[in-house]
Image (cartoon, coloured by chain):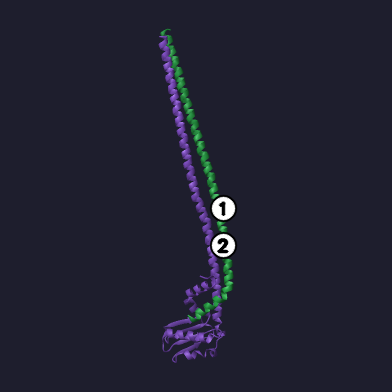
Chain colours: A purple, B green
Amino acid sequence: MSESLEKLQNRILSDAKHKSDETVKDAQAKSQQILEDAKQRAQRESQEIIAKANVEAESIRRSILSSKVRVNRLRILDEKNRIVQDIIHGVEDRLSSISKSEQFEETAQRLVTEAVKAVDSDHPVVRIGFRDVSKRNLDGISRVFPKGGKLVIDEKPIDGLGGVVATDHEGKVVFNNTFKSRLERLDNQLLTLISSTVFGG
Amino acid sequence: MSGIDAVKKIVETEAQARRIVDEASAKAQQMISETREQAERIRQEAIARAQQRREEILREAKEKAEAEARQSDKETEQILDTYGKLSEERKAAAVSKAVELILNA
């Protein structure tokens, strides 16, 4: 009786010890898993933070650089434009004072000839006006002027810079051959020429 | 030993067994609880390191971009300087060519 009781007691205690060991063992395994999960989660979250930071850094870089590059491109364009405009003003000065040059008579004749040809009329009306030009300076024009035509001499330069405007006798066809019109018509070529001369390429 | 004594012994032993199991259970809960705290610390420390690295990445990017922007300014100044010199040297030629174009085109 006593021996079997002792066995029963030992059995009860042994079962409890076994259950206790299992409980602790399970807890250790669960703890290990919790730590592993936490490390993986931490690594994943860290990688996400770094990846986002890299994207954000590229965005900051682009933002700083693109605005700077834009500003500097504008400065360069403004300077090129200023230089080109300065040269065009020089061109306008030269054209408006062409009457003082040796080229004047030939130029005036060419402008008249082109304008008369453009309106294609037997009785063209040609208005001519340059700075500091009188009738005397325009004697050469009569050589290229058609007999049925009418020549009107303005005392002031037409369109500011001077030139020629031809119409047919009814005034329906008009050809503006002033320097200002020629500058406008040749605008693209002019800008290309000035640009390539000054900046090359 | 009487039957009553034997029952008493068994009851005592079972109580002892319950204590053993209860103690193990409490120890296990304590272990898991401490592990959870440790896991949260590990996570927080890792995130703090990542945040610190993030700040470094952003600061480095900003400094690098600002250095590149200064370089862009420097290059622009050089270009503007070159344009100024070219304009001075070639203005007369450009005016003459342009006048010829307007007169003869």
Question: Which disc, if any, is residue B28?
Answer: none
Per the image, label 1 sits on a secondary structure element best described as helix
Residue A39, percent from left and from top: 48, 38
Residue A62, percent from left and from top: 51, 55
Among numbered discs 1 and 2, the one appearing first in the sequence = 1
Quarter of the image with the N terminus of chain A in it:
top left
Q: Mark 2 points at which residue?
A: B75
Q: Which of A116 and B28 is in front in this view?
A: B28
Residue for point 46% across, 21% down: B20
Whether A187 is drawn above or below A109: the answer is above
Residue at the far bottom: name it: A147
Label 1 with label 2: CB-CB less than 8 Å: no
Residue B69, percent from left and from top: 56, 58
Q: Nearer the viewer, mark 1 or mark 2?
A: 2
Residue for point 53% across, 45% down: B53
Residue A16 sits in quarter: top left
Q: How dense is the environment of label 2, judged by Cα within 10 Å: few (below 14), some, or many (20 and up)? A: few
Question: Which disc, if any, is residue B63?
Answer: 1
Q: How far apart are marks 1 and 2 (CA)?
A: 18 Å
Q: How dense is the environment of label 1, judged by Cα within 10 Å: few (below 14), some, or many (20 and up)? A: few
Residue type, label 2: Glu
Residue at the far top: name it: B2
Per the image, label 2 sits on a secondary structure element best described as helix
The chain letter for the residue carrying disc 2 is: B
Residue B91 sits in quarter: bottom right
Residue A3 sits in quarter: top left
Whether B99 is drawn above or below A67: the answer is below
Residue for point 54% across, 62% down: A72
Whether B13 is drawn above or below B78: the answer is above
The chain letter for the residue carrying disc 1 is: B
Residue type, label 1: Glu
